[in-house]
Amino acid sequence: MVMVIGEMYMAKYLRRTVIIDAEQFFPDKNPWPQGVYTLETGFGPLGKLTVINRRYYISTLAGEMEVLSGDFIITEVEGKRYACKKDIFNMTYERIDLPPKPVPPPLRILKEGQIPK
């Protein structure tokens, strides 16, 4: 905090730029982002269960987090994963296109005594 003539002002901070991986989740789009699973509740005789409630979750460091259709699943640099609502994601993140990683040339098997070119 900064004191200015008896008044207190909250310090301002800028979020550091970090590149993350993110996938948008839709229940009807397969495959789902890594780590998303579903829990279903229902009623009816065994083998003929009628699903009345289906929810989607992801395991995070803080516990299980519900994921809704359209949420983004974020994977941070350290591997932490969590869900983020679409509107907050769009206010916080901007898509970037990184160049593809270079592919190493294929290995060649040399005959004994052959000099590589």
Image (cartoon, rainbow, N blue to C red):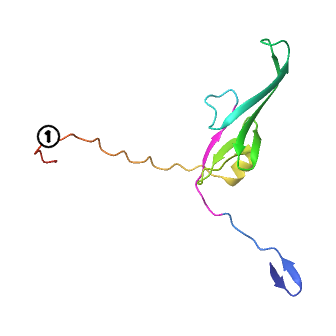
37 or 15, nearer to the observer? 37
Q: Residue at x 17, y 41 (%)?
A: 110
50 or 103, nearer to the observer? 50
71 or 35, nearer to the observer? 35
Residue 85 lies in what quarter of the image? Answer: top right
Give how far across and how far down residue 18 sits, in percent.
60, 58
Q: Residue at x 75, y 71 (%)?
A: 12
Magenta residue check for 17: yes
Give how far across and how far down residue 107 sits, in percent.
27, 42
Q: Quadrant of the N terminus?
A: bottom right
Residue at the spot of label 1 = 111
Q: Residue at x 12, y 42 (%)?
A: 112
**Tag 1: residue type?**
Lys
Q: Which residues are magenta?
A: 16-26
- Residue farthest toward the front in the current orientation of the protein: 46
Residue 31 visible, this orientation: yes
- In the image, residue 49 sits, relative to residue 10, either above or below, namely above
